[in-house]
Image (cartoon, coloured by chain):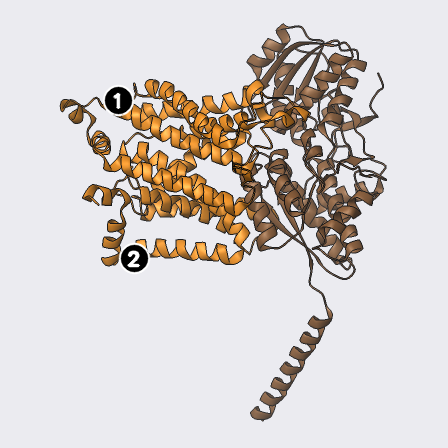
Chain colours: A brown, B orange
Amino acid sequence: MKSWLGKRMAATGLLVLLMLAVAACGEQGPLRVGVMQSVTGPGESYGTVIVQAMEMAVDQINEAGGVDGRMLEIIVEDTKCGAQDAITAYNKLTDVNGVKIILGTTCSGAMLGAAPLAERDGVVLFSASATNPDISEAGDYIFRTAINDLQLGTDMGNLIWSDGVRNLATITESTDYAEGVRRTSVAQFESLGGTIAAEERFASDTTDFRSQLEKLLNANPDGLLVSVQGEFSGGTILKQVRELGYDGPIFGESVTAGTQALEVAGDAATGLKSVLPDLDPGNQSAQQFLADFRERYGYVTLPWFLGSAYDDVFITAECLSQTGDDQDADGFRDCLYGITWSGTIGDDYGFDDKGEVIGLSNAVVQVLPTDERTEENNGYKVLGGIPST
Amino acid sequence: MTALARRAFQPGELRRRAAAGDVKLWASLLILVWAAVFMIWQGLGFAISIGSVFAIWAILAVSLNLVVGYAGLLSVGHIGFFGIGAYAAAILTSNASYEQLRTEAIPTFAWPFFAALPVSIALVGVAAVVVGVVLNRFRDDIYVLVSFGFAIIAFNVFLNGRGLTRGAFGVHQIARPAIGGWELTGELEFLILLLVFLALTVAVSWLIVTSSFGRVLTAIREDEQAIEVFGYRATHYKLAIWVISAMLAGLAGALFASWTSFIDPNSFILLESVLLVSIVILGGLASIWGSLLGAMAFVLLEEGMRFLPFLPAEYVGQARQAVLGILLVLLMLFRPQGLVGRYRL
């Protein structure tokens, strides 16, 4: 009896193995894409949520059957927001994992460190969040859905001028992003005839801004531009400048109007005007995405950057579907140049011959009083497009 | 080889311990060899890039060990000299193509790398004399605090000296070295260059610590007042080794700038300085061989963490840092004198 049972089990096992082998022959392996983000280091607050948005996108694609039946797989590496780690992460992904398409990086510094290698090796680098203007010159294989700081700064300068400010004070975090926004905003504002009353800068680990804000207010500005990289700094500046008695208009970029910044600032943020790429409340896929993200992770922060990362994965899936090969970086690059995409961050956008996103624009938003802020409206109302000057 | 020379490089010490069946040492060496083989097996290009990181950190560690290990001066400001060397090389080799960039311009000199390198090292030397004269007035805990202050000042100069460093935007497209018409664009060629400079650094350091000058330094470490009784001006010796050590860090900085082709102030934060001191202690104080081992252990540990297979993607980076921290604590717990060191801090 036992011997008979043993034979039956052995035969069944063999059959199962044979079936698995046949199935494996007929099935292709996953399509593999590298992800380089700053999940630790200075850009951690962006990098971590960007990876989460990408993982969600990959899961959704795979649950819906993958890319033409093949699973999409991402391999995540940390760049710590710096060039050295970007280079080792890049070499690990390309040499060990053999990927030819990399979604990243979070920070511009890491992007500028890895871009020469990607350009040399013919590997696509595709960023959701690096905004430094110099990236547009980085090469033929370098793409981004992040909007260049030049555009943001120009829009900000126009907004400040059209709001009647003529004598502006600025406070800026000493990072490439925040400095870039300040520089281009001020250049545009000055070109329209405005003057700069006073300027202050601070290092990223600063927590008390009162003395610097006092100096700014002593210059009697009729507007204040807050340009920061960290939401905590943005929120604290708003809070402290109102505590010092300033009641004039305040302008900020997307970080200053971020969820955490508004929490820190409380009512002091009310009325803040911000120029940011915003997820359109009328865009069904954007709202669905935000709802899914909130359900999966329990929160939403930096919604536009989340959307940008999410779209990047779907664009990647589309281009992989066209090329059918995750090793065909040239085909993937050509697909990106030719693509017109409608996703969470906008409709009918694409890439110009420098890999810069085109067809997306910034919006002007104004922060609401605390009792009107909800998870759905992110704490602000959209006033519309950038005013003409 | 004199007894002192053998102690400096310590292959004899290694042999003695190995023969005595020092299990911890064998285990450390075995893990290092295994990790190195694993990296090469994973991919040669990746191994070359971490080999380059190792060479740069090894130059830094060997140079810092001259000050911390041999002279007994605990400095956490070494990263400042690394940064000055990097920025000096980046600015001196910069060419007019920067002007085409849309962010702020810096002065352009367009020197070849090998012309910029000695000048960068000399500039670091000048800075080190100035800082060293001030630092020499302090001892022990205050010395550490003042060197800490130097690291902070250096970082802020890199960040706010925008006319020279482009501040937070960083310097891009830093030239690779060229020999004649042959530019070292390949990663392997650059690794060989780095290893040549590492060998030179080791040779210079070895010559220093095995000379009578080195013996005085070790004596200063043991008892500064006693050595002054014999007529040695301890401050001169301390200043000399400080400047030499800083210039070697400047060399590492110039090579680093050329290797990454992009630098910004974030590469020279205080944390990097603390990591560097950890490497020196991890390897072993007053041991050149120990600094090489320490740098290799650190780089292999940090990069090896990329192969942790069982974590959700969004936590890989954080876990890597946490595991690295725990491993360093464990190493210090079980080998407080470092892998091959003679002294505790």
User: Do circles 2 and 1 both sit on a common chain?
Assistant: yes
Q: Give the amino acid at mark 2.
A: Val
Residue located farthest toward the front when viewing the structure as drawn: B180
- Of helix, strand and loop, which one carries label 2? helix
Whether residue B315 can be seen here: no
- The quarter in which the C terminus of chain A is drawn is top right
Which residue is more in the foreground, B284 or A51?
Answer: B284
Residue placed under numbered mark 1 in the picture? B236
Q: Residue at the location (75% across, 15% down)?
A: A189
Q: Is residue B75 left or right of residue A271?
A: left
- Of helix, strand and loop, which one carries label 1? helix
Which residue is more in the foreground, B26 or B95?
Answer: B95
Residue placed under numbered mark 2 in the picture? B23
Q: Residue at the location (71% across, 50% down)?
A: A329
Q: In this view, does B158 lie to the left or right of B298?
A: right
- Snapshot quadrant of residue A195: top right
Answer few, some or many: residues within 10 Å of disc 2's Cα (few below 14, many 20 plus, some between 14 and 19): few
Q: Are marks 2 and 1 in contact (CB under 8 Å)?
A: no
Answer few, some or many: residues within 10 Å of disc 1's Cα (few below 14, many 20 plus, some between 14 and 19): few
Q: Give the amino acid at mark 1.
A: His
Residue A171 to residue A53: above or below = above
Tell me the tag on residue A341.
none
Q: Residue at the location (33% across, 44% down)?
A: B290
- Snapshot quadrant of residue A201: top right
> How far apart are the alpha carbons under marks 2 and 1?
42 Å
Q: Mark 2 lies on which chain?
A: B
Where does the image place residue B77, in percent across and percent down from the top left?
A: 40, 28
- The quarter in which the N terminus of chain A is drawn is bottom right
Where does the image place residue B131, in percent across and percent down from the top left?
A: 37, 20
How many callouts does the rendering have?
2
Q: Earlier in the sequence, mark 2 or mark 1?
A: 2
Q: Which chain carries label 1?
A: B
